[in-house]
Amino acid sequence: MNQVASLIIGRDDQNLEKRNIVWNMVGSFLYAFASMILTIAVVQIAGEDAGGIFTFAFTTLGQHMFTMAYFGIRPFQITDTGNQYSFGEYLGLRLFTCGAALLVGLGFVAVNDYSFDKAATVVLMVAYKVIDALADTYEAEFQRSGRLYLTGKSNAFRTILSVGVFLSVLAATKMLVVASGLAVAAQIVGFLVFDVLVIRELPNIDWKSKPGRKFKLFKDNTLLFFSVVLDFYIFSASKYAIEACMADKDMAVYGAIFMPTSVINLVAGFVIRPYLTKMSLVWEMGDTKRFMKTIGKLAGVIAALTVLALGCAWFLGIPVLSLLYSNISYALAECRPAFVLIILGGALNAFMSLFYYALVIMKMQKYIFGVYGIVGIMAVLLSTPLVRSGGIFGGALAYVILMAALMVLFGMFVFVGVVRKVRDNH
């Protein structure tokens, strides 16, 4: 086992930075790509009903429980270069949040009248995602210790192993529950090999946990935790409404037209994140003109990409999705207006992300939480009535309204923050 871990770690050399970049890109791509390919594969191999069940279990409730277990703590951990908290303390807190997320997932299934197969699949996918969140603690520590390439390797190899097992078993048996159970087993094996074994071979990992420190860490991140949980609920509120009010096959259709938002979010991240350090420095210098100029430049790029995405969505979107999801092509043909709304919502989400990062740089986190609270209430009040009255189109309309509300409110507070900064400078 030590030799396996040493082989994964490799040798320390002058190419460490290159390895960090390459493996992080590989791991991030495979992780993002897996979510898209899995939903397509389940619909095509096991049928539309199974596809709807899996879409909800994996991309909605499972991902929401991942967010709860994740606790929004990774950015805090990777930037804790002064070791304010030990790895043992981060791990202790994450074990607690993972356990809580698993219990919430089980409780959600218990209060819903699901068939055995659906209940088992949902529980297994929650477990899969919770293990993912636990592995993230180790991967954040790899990054904190300057070995981001190990994070990329873990993401890449765990994804290949668990997804490979899932697809192989599903293709052989057509049984979603069996494939999900073995995917969880593969996820556990990947976590033990690529995270637990590896970290024990690294130097200077502090496993100690002092009394009261985990609770302090919990308090330090509580506001961020509630923000990310509310954020994902708002993002997924229309999916929850579709699952509650419509059939499993409708969830498969909605998941198909929703899938491109993952690509939009990925592209937005690539556009925005390289500028964050520069924006932080400019803001600290008090240069509000350059700060707003950078925001304007990024907004212009996102706007141009939005026009391109909407054009492609109207003319090419449904034909391309019908090729990928041939089993539900008959239903997708009627969803062009809903699909265009979803793409518009994804673009508004990209603008919202830009303003969100700006507020984080401006140290206005309390306003972020307030906005999420307001829009979270809107999500509860709007999503189910719109789905009941408009079906899939109603779900898409709810999504675009919520994304627009986040974008407008975040943008408004960015403007307020800049005005305050200008006034304080004078």
Image (cartoon, helix red, strand yellow):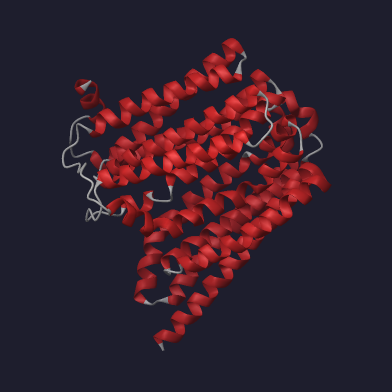
In this orientation, does residue 21 appear? yes
For the point 49% across and 75% down, which residue is it? 417
- Left/right placement of residue 117 relative to residue 211 reads right
Vertical side of 298 occupied by 61: above or below: above
For the point 53% across and 57% down, which residue is it? 353
Q: Quadrant of residue 286?
A: bottom left
- Left/right placement of residue 168 relative to residue 188 reads right
Question: Which residue occupies the foreground of this view, 294 or 406?
Answer: 406
Vertical side of 227 occupied by 96: above or below: above
Please provide percent x and percent y for residue 70: 43, 45
For the point 29% across and 37% down, which residue is it? 19
For the point 52% across and 60% down, which residue is it? 354
Q: Quadrant of the N terminus?
A: top left
Please provide percent x and percent y for residue 43: 66, 24
Please provide percent x and percent y for residue 108: 60, 38
Question: Which residue occupies the foreground of this view, 105 or 23?
Answer: 105
